[in-house]
């Protein structure tokens, strides 16, 4: 099984990068949604 260690490490690395990118996208979407909600609320106050 030792020859496959490189593939296992590569698989975990790719998975970590993919999950990190997904989480980053979620944070960006949440920030944009919050900004949109604040803009709508500001328009209602005026």
Image: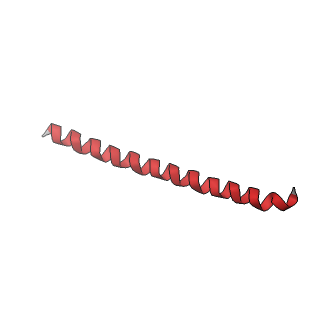
Residue 39 coordinates in the image, percent (x, y) = 23, 45
Q: Between residues 4 and 40, which one lies in front from this camera angle?
A: 4
- Seen at 34% across and 44% down, the residue is 33
Residue 37 coordinates in the image, percent (x, y) = 28, 41
Q: How many numbered discs?
A: 0
Look at the image and name its color scheme.
secondary structure
Q: Between residues 15 and 32, which one lies in front from this camera angle?
A: 15
Which quadrant would the N terminus be assigned to in this image? Answer: bottom right
Q: Residue furthest right?
A: 1
Which quadrant would the C terminus be assigned to in this image? Answer: top left
Residue 19 coordinates in the image, percent (x, y) = 57, 50
Q: Between residues 21 and 3, which one lies in front from this camera angle?
A: 3
Residue 10 lies left or right of residue 37; in this view the side is right
Residue 13 coordinates in the image, percent (x, y) = 67, 58
- Seen at 56% across and 53% down, the residue is 20
- Seen at 51% across and 50% down, the residue is 22
Q: Where 10 falls versus 19 (above or below)?
A: below
Q: Where 13 falls versus 46 (above or below)?
A: below
């Amino acid at each position: 099984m030792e020859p496959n260690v490189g593939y296992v490490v590569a698989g975990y690395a790719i998975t970590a990068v993919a999950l990190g990118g997904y989480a980053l996208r979620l944070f960006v979407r949440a920030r944009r949604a919050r900004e949109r909600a604040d803009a709508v609320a500001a328009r209602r106050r005026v």
